[in-house]
């Protein structure tokens, strides 16, 4: 039955372009991009499915078929060490999988922190994540979205960004004159960077976001596991114990902090799988995305 289910899902995903998925690219900002300064980098794709030098952030919307009831929506943050974005395997492919289960998804092409293009590089990605959820709540009625069922999902460094929105939705680091709620309703974190501490950090992500010699206060602020409160959104984690890129202890520390604060959370640690497996951990017959959707359903987010 498991093999049959996976085969059917592959068929569904393969068929989605033929079924004319409604995709729309939406600029994140109507005017000048905040916290930016003149610079010359050109966005490029050094490898298929990867994007670097992002200075003009966007949302790519994958609208699920419209139903009579309002739909769940998920913002997806691809990973890439805050240096690039794995825009296909940790973005577009995931959005199609959500569409297949009736969830509208938005792939966030967020700015990558750089001193040459930003006044303050450490808040640039968070600004884009806050702006993304602001747009979804502003346009929820137009897009048939339930404004109380908007989640954030992230892979690797994108998981750090997703988790950062979960703990740093307030105060706003963008203009928010209408006081739109910037808190995601839930988080799905796949092999996420969580901590900026010396013992746990993925140093590439840390160096790119907050510099090579960050002060203690900055390391603590951007260590999501240290910023959890009872108001932090519920979270689902998936990772592999043999991840040699981002230590599994990142997710475990975040999960334990959520448990301490009585925030509903669930963690799935596979024995093998390494880092960057996207939707498909080839070492197991499990399809972890199904488990994540079941978690969403159990918590009434879908």
Image (cartoon, grey):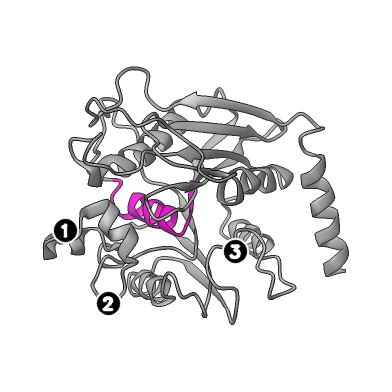
Over which residues does the magenta segment extend? 151-169
As measured in the structure, the alpha-carbon distance from the residue carrying label 2 to the one carrying label 1 is: 15 Å
Tag 1 secondary structure: helix
Residue density around tag 2, few if under 14, some if 14–19, many if 20 or more, within 10 Å: few
Q: Residues within 10 Å of mark 1 (few under 14, many from 20)?
A: some
Tell me: 47 left or right of 182: right
Tell whether position 156 is magenta: yes
Residue 287 lies in quadrant: bottom right
Residue at 43% of width from left, 52% of height from top? 158
Residue underneath mark 3 = 277
* Image quadrant containing the N terminus: bottom right
Q: x, y (%) of residue 27? A: 45, 24
Rendered image: mark on residue 218: 1
**Circles 3 and 2: CB atoms closer than 8 Å:** no
Question: Is residue 147 part of the magenta span, yes or no?
Answer: no
Disc 1 to disc 3, how far (Cα)? 30 Å
Question: Does residue 62 lie above or below 213 as drawn?
Answer: above
- Between 18 and 70, the one lying in front of the other is 18
Q: Position of residue 274 (x, y in %)?
A: 55, 73
Secondary structure beneath disc 2? loop
Question: Which is closer to the viewer, label 1 or label 3?
Answer: 3
Mark 2 or mark 1: name the one nearer the start of the chain.
Answer: 2
On screen, 269 above or below 191? below
Q: Secondary structure at mark 3?
A: loop
Q: Which residue is mark 2?
A: 199
Looking at the image, residue 295 sits to the left or right of residue 7; the answer is: left
Q: Is residue 230 visible?
A: no
Contact, mark 1 vs mark 3 (Cβ under 8 Å): no
């Amino acid at each position: 039955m498991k093999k049959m289910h996976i085969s059917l899902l592959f068929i569904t995903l393969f068929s989605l372009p033929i079924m004319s998925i409604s995709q729309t690219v939406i600029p994140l900002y109507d005017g000048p991009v905040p916290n930016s300064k003149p610079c010359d980098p050109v966005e490029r794709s050094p490898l298929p499915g990867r994007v670097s030098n992002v200075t003009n952030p966007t949302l790519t919307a994958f609208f699920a078929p419209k139903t009579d009831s309002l739909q769940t929506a998920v913002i997806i943050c691809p990973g890439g060490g805050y240096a690039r974005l794995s825009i296909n395997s940790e973005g577009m492919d995931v959005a199609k999988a959500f569409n297949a289960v009736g969830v509208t998804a938005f792939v966030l092409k967020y700015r990558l922190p750089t001193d040459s293009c930003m006044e303050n590089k450490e808040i640039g990605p968070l600004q884009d994540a806050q702006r993304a959820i602001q747009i979804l709540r502003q346009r929820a009625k137009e897009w048939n979205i339930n404004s109380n069922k908007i989640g954030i999902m992230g892979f690797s460094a994108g998981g750090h960004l997703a988790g950062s929105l979960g703990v740093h939705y307030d105060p706003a680091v963008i203009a928010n004159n209408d006081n739109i709620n910037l808190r995601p309703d839930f988080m799905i974190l796949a092999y996420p960077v969580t901590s900026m501490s010396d013992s746990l950090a993925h140093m590439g992500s840390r160096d790119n976001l907050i510099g090579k010699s960050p002060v203690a206060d900055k390391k603590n602020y951007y260590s999501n596991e240290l910023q959890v409160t009872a108001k932090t959104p519920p979270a689902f984690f998936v990772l592999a114990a043999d991840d040699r890129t981002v230590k599994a202890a990142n997710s475990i520390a975040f999960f334990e902090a959520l448990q301490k604060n009585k925030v509903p959370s669930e963690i799935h640690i596979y024995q093998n799988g390494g880092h960057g497996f996207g939707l498909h951990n080839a070492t197991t017959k499990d399809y972890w995305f199904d488990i994540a959707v079941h978690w969403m359903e159990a918590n009434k987010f879908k």
